[in-house]
């Protein structure tokens, strides 16, 4: 079993929809939780970052972490065609030389 | 802005060739990483380095080696390329080990081994 599980999709939604992306994990030592966005033919870029449990909001994006359930989510409100990308969740323990553990990524298409 | 550059965007090599993929970062980051990305498998860590001349194996180091002679440069070496090493290779760097420690990625090198 991978340490981080993420449904690869693909996910296709109309413009304006609310998108929910999720990951589960097995290692309770993870403390830092991130979402990266990767456009086609580009490297991933950090989108959201959360430490421990709770919610974080940035514009149309909300990241949620539930450590008791080992479950993290990314919500995108009022989705736009420009949100079409692959979204990767990533997690990190407190130390271990800065290594991140990635999910497989979910491919999202928002159609106009 | 942090910049991570990779020597080639596209590369075609023959089976058995020795292949060098170069990565350079310009922000004095301590850590550097090499991943490969394949459809359905996501990002898989090959090797990483937390200091000059220091390296650690990731999840799939077989068939690869690395070199970090200078802080800003991290090279991935395929000693004898095989067709199953056809993939997108991504390099990343990060400042340190604690806290947020965001990884910054390069644009990737699409390697085809024929």
Image (cartoon, coloured by chain):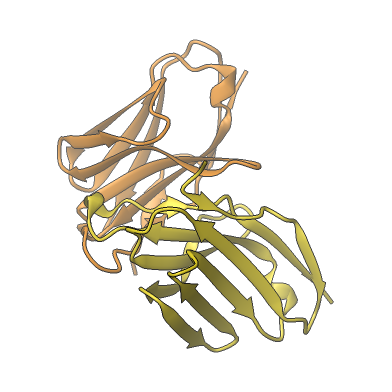
From this view, report whether residue B13 is shown above or below residue A97: above
Q: Would residue A44 be visible to someone looking at this image?
A: no
| Residue B97 horizontal side relative to residue A103, left or right | left
Residue B11 spot, x, y in % from top left? 54, 31
What residue is shown at x 45% (from left), y 53% (from top)?
Answer: A26
Residue nearest the observer in this picture, B75 or A24: A24
Which color has been applied to chain B in this rendered view? orange
Q: Would residue B16 be visible to someone looking at this image?
A: yes
Q: Which chain is yellow?
A: A
What residue is shown at x 56% (from left), y 61% (from top)?
Answer: A23
Residue B38 spot, x, y in % from top left? 60, 39
Residue A43 spot, x, y in % from top left? 51, 55
From this view, report whether residue A29 is shown above or below residue B79: below
Q: Residue furthest top?
A: B16
Residue nearest the observer in this picture, B43 or A29: A29
What residue is shown at x 38% (from left), y 41% (from top)?
Answer: B34
From this view, report whether residue A90 is shown above or below residue B85: below
Residue nearest the observer in this picture, A7 or B78: A7
Residue B76 spot, x, y in % from top left? 36, 32
What residue is shown at x 25% (from left), y 36% (from top)?
Answer: B56
**Image quarter in which the C terminus of chain B is found:** top right
| Residue B14 horizontal side relative to residue B97, left or right | right
Residue nearest the observer in this picture, A4 or B15: A4
């Amino acid at each position: 079993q991978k340490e981080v599980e993420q449904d690869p999709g693909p996910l296709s939604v109309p413009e304006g929809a609310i998108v929910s992306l999720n990951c589960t994990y097995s290692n309770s030592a993870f403390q830092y939780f991130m979402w990266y966005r990767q456009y086609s033919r580009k490297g991933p870029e950090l989108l959201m970052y959360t430490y421990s449990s709770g919610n974080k909001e940035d514009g149309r994006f909300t990241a949620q972490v539930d450590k008791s359930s080992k479950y993290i989510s990314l919500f995108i409100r009022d989705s736009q065609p420009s949100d079409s990308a692959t979204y990767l969740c990533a997690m990190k323990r407190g130390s271990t030389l800065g290594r991140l553990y990635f999910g497989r990524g979910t491919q999202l298409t928002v159609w106009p | 802005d942090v910049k991570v550059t990779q020597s080639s965007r596209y590369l075609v090599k023959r089976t058995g060739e020795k292949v060098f993929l170069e990565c350079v970062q310009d922000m004095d980051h301590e850590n550097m990483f090499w991943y490969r990305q394949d459809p359905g498998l996501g990002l898989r860590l090959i090797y990483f380095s937390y200091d000059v001349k220091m390296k650690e194996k990731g999840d799939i180091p077989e068939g690869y080696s690395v070199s970090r002679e200078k802080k800003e440069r991290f090279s991935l070496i395929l000693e004898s390329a095989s067709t199953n090493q056809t993939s997108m290779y991504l390099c990343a760097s990060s400042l340190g080990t604690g806290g947020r420690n965001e990884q910054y990625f390069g644009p990737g090198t699409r390697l085809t081994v024929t």
